[in-house]
Image (spheres, rainbow, N blue to C red):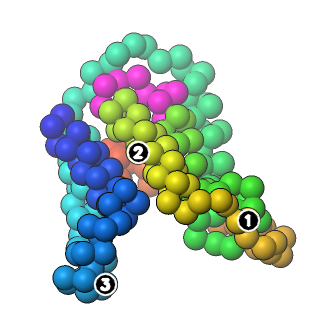
Amino acid sequence: MSWLLSGILLWGLIHAIPIYAPVTRAQVITSVGVWPYKALFAIALLGTINMIVQGWIDCAPETLFIPNPTLFYATRILMLPVTILLVAGFLPTNLKRYIRHPQLTGIVLWGVAHLLSNQDLRSYLLFGGMIVWAILMIIGINKRDGAWEKPEKVSYFKDIILLIVSVLVCITLSITHIYFTGTYVTG
């Protein structure tokens, strides 16, 4: 359990540096340079992901209460919108005209979706922790960046590409879920 908690906390702290400690970030960049900073940042994040995954594997699921079996279907249904939001962060789409932080919003929805069908302690730590982290990032980014300027409209063709890519990613994640989580998507 300590690896899981430590990984989640470090994930949040590392991501918080650029938003909540920009002076510290600037000092580190001045000391080591931009690319070494980015490399250190990426290595640190990979380390926290490893800690989270290893902590998840090592932590026996302690059921807090019995889940409603029908909520599993809600999780499955919500995963396509989650995937659309996550993929939208990488592509120019009109969705960004309506949602300022599509990826962070996707993380919140991902956490909620998984909490619907997972009522064990490690799930509440992981998914609840990621929900809290994403909300704090949204608040911090909004405060740092000020008023939101909506991006320009893009071709609807790009929205179609977003949908096609998202469906393919969602199917792939569903099929490969066992390999990166240790659990099958069932139902």
Residue 136 in picture, x, y percent from top left: 45, 45
Q: Is residue 158 above or below residue 180?
A: below
Task: Residue at 52% x, 54% y: name it.
Answer: 143
Q: Is residue 170 above or below residue 131?
A: below
**Mark 3: which secondary structure?**
helix
Q: Residues within 10 Å of mark 3 (few under 14, many from 20)?
A: few
Extreme residue in the top direction: 65
Residue 133, numbered circle:
2
Task: Residue at 48% x, 35% y: name it.
Answer: 114
Q: What stretch of residues is rendered in magenta? A: 114-122
Q: Nearer the viewer, mark 3 or mark 2?
A: 3
Residue 44 left/right relative to 100:
left
Residue 34, numbered circle:
3
Q: Residues within 10 Å of mark 1 (few under 14, many from 20)?
A: few
**Mark 1: which secondary structure?**
loop
Residue carrying label 1? 150
Mark 3 or mark 2: whose residue is earlier in sequence: 3
Which amino acid does the dot numbered 3 rest on?
Val
Q: Is residue 157 magenta?
A: no
Q: Residues within 10 Å of mark 2 (few under 14, many from 20)?
A: many
* C-alpha span from label 1 to label 2: 24 Å
Mark 1 or mark 2: whose residue is earlier in sequence: 2
Q: Quadrant of residue 125?
A: top left
Extreme residue in the right direction: 156
Q: Is residue 115 magenta?
A: yes
